[in-house]
Amino acid sequence: MDYRTPQFYRLMSYAAQADHDVVDMVSGSPDWAAPAGIADGLQAYADRGGADFRYPPSEGLDALREEIAARRGVSRDQVIVTNGAGEANYLAMAAALDRGTGSGVLLTDPVYPYYPGKIQLLGGEPRYVPAERDGTLDPAAVRGVASEDTGAIVVNTPNNPTGAVYPEETMAELVAVAEEHDAVLLSDEVYDHFDRSGEFTSALGINSEHRAVTNAFSKSMAITGFRVGYGVFPAALHDAARTRHMLINVTGSRPAQYAVLRALRSTGPDYYAEKRRLLGERIETFAAALEECGAEFTRPEGGFYVMARFPDYPGSFENAERLVDRAGVAGMPGTAFGESRADWFRFALLTPAVETAGRRLVDFFE
Ligand SMILES: Cc1ncc(COP(=O)(O)O)c(C=O)c1O
């Protein structure tokens, strides 16, 4: 499969051209409001002017890096503020491959499609480890595929698209496999605030020079358009990541970082808890409709997405278009995430119209 052409935009534009109402369950952008600190921060920033409108430090505002470091229990020197988790992932993959200890990158199948896309751009070779039926990952399967050509292992917990949350033993084992093969475990934790299982374990909890962690405020603060994320890099990757970040971007956006810092300091745990509660409600509403459709699905333990398989209706692009045309629901075809979920669809629960979408699916599959 060619992952260099993201299919996501193709389906979004197809749905946008429909001449009838379509519930968008494709996009990964939260539909709820950002915390109040974001707007407060932007307004306060607008009045500053002068030196504050100039380049920020390339690695990010010192105060923001300090705030992130304190929250994550790492030193400020390990943190680079990036243009979203997307850039942080790219920097970590590039730095891991630049170590020259292997060009193979282990990914799960199903996979968040931008990982293989980036790895192919960087000249690495994606290799796939099938996830379990419920979306969890068996570290023994990862160990079975790892070889002396493995340069990196890339995982995402809570997971897009499966909704699985990897327990502590899995994370510890994955770091161990990376260490055994002189590779880097990259853990993308962009959905960490949306763990509803209580099982989420950051790879930062496992001390090792062989793990990097990426994250962002895109999802947790509902600001996908701001482009503020970060990577926590071990010493061996930090300089390579910093140099690449500087040469490609010069730096990131100062107003966006300023607002995120303000929001980090002023947003309490209730904001995140309320979003988890809302998602939990939407999951139950959607699950009831999927049951009525006779679909197979797993209730996600974290993140935004539900994967479902309908009887005799494989997750091809054509079938996704047919759902847009005939049901008025846009969901991602499972084929976009690899071979193992070719019979499935992924639905993002980031719309107030989850109930409407569910009803439409029930009518369509009746
Ligand atoms: C697993 C995963 N990583 C990274 C990203 C991109 O995050 P950002 O918008 O912060 O670049 C997404 C967005 O959907 C994602 O699902």
Image: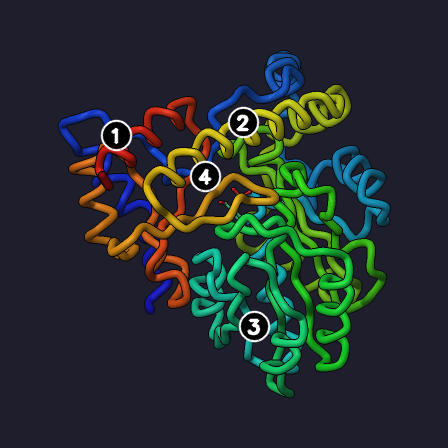
Distance in Å between CA atoms under marks 3 and 1? 36 Å
- Dot 1: few (<14), some (14–19), or many (≥20) neighbours within 10 Å? many
Query: Residue 75: percent from the left, percent from the top?
Result: 86, 49
Query: Residue 254: percent from the left, percent from the top?
Result: 62, 31
Task: Give the quadrant of residue 334.
Answer: bottom left
Which mark identifies residue 106?
3
Which mark identifies residue 22?
1
Q: Amino acid at mark 2?
A: Glu
Q: Which residue is mark 4?
A: 28
The mark closer to the camera, 1 or 2, is 2
Left or right: residue 274 compared with residue 324: right
Residue at the extreme bottom of the image, as rendered: 148
The vertical placement of 289 against 207, above or below, is: above
Q: Tell me which residue sits at (72%, 63%) in the image.
A: 170
Q: Which residue is mark 2?
A: 281
Whether ligand 1 has any atom under 8 Å from the Cβ at mark 4 is answered as yes
